[in-house]
Image (spheres, rainbow, N blue to C red):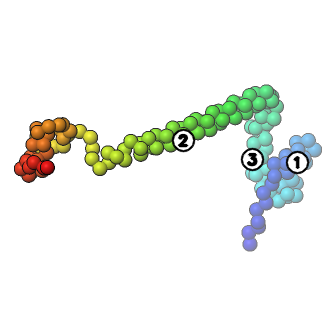
Amino acid sequence: MSENRKHFAATEKMAILRRHLLEQVPVSELCDEYRIHPTLFYRWQKQLFENGAAAFEYHSKGAQDAATKKLSSLEEKLARKNEVLSELMEEYVKLKKRLGMPRAELGPAGRARCRGRLPAPLVSTGRVAAQAVASLAGHPLQQVL
């Protein structure tokens, strides 16, 4: 049967590598003791040497604080922008509803097309307007008392 795999924490890996490097314990003894394959041990050692320089890098706390402050100010600015946009959209929708409702029954603005030709404007006064409406409706002009 196969054995369950053991997952080592970073501190455990460092302890194993330290025993080999400082105490000169042979790799074969460490591998037998911790039941790991030698290729795994050498992979850990390679990772340690490749990433070991990161432990000696100087990390300024001021640079991290400045980045944190900038990030928080940008987040606040974005939140304020979203608030303003939502208020403007709400006002826009209210205005659109208020202005658009009475004219909804009239249809779109402009002139209506009638078989490829434009009829006379629907909004005018006098007898000419009445004749234009009557011709569009298909009824003769009648006087209403």
**Within 10 angstroms of label 3, few (less than 14), some, or many (20 or more) residues?**
few
Q: How many marks?
A: 3
Tell which of 120 and 89 is nearer to you. Answer: 120
Q: Which residue is mark 2?
A: 86
Q: Secondary structure at mark 2?
A: helix
Q: Nearer the viewer, residue 109 or 57?
A: 109
Q: Residues within 10 Å of mark 1 (few under 14, many from 20)?
A: few
**Quadrant of the image for the N terminus?**
bottom right
* Pointer 1 with pointer 3, Cβ within 8 A: no
139 and 14: which is toward the camera = 139
**Image point (46%, 44%), residue name:** 94
> Dot 3: what SS?
helix
Q: Residue at x 61, y 36 (%)?
A: 80
Gap between marks 1 and 3, in whole Å? Answer: 15 Å
> What residue is disc 3 on?
43
Query: Disc 1 residue type?
Result: Ala
Q: Which residue is mark 1?
A: 15
Which is nearer the N-term, disc 2 or disc 1?
Answer: 1
Residue at the extreme front: 145
* Nearer to us: label 2 or label 1: 2
Within the image, what quadrant is residue 86 found in? top right
Q: Nearer the viewer, mark 2 or mark 3?
A: 2
Left or right position of 28 against 138: right
Picture coordinates of residue 88, whole percent (x, y):
51, 38
Calculate the distance from the C-alpha at mark 2 to the C-alpha at mark 1. 56 Å
Residue 108 pos. (x, y %): 27, 44
Question: For the point 18% across and 43% down, which residue is it?
Answer: 112
Specify which label sits upstream in the sequence, 2 or 3: 3
Front position in the image: 141 or 63:
141
Q: Amino acid at mark 3?
A: Arg
Q: Can you tell which of label 1 and label 3 is closer to the viewer?
A: 1
Residue 40: x and y in percent read 76, 52
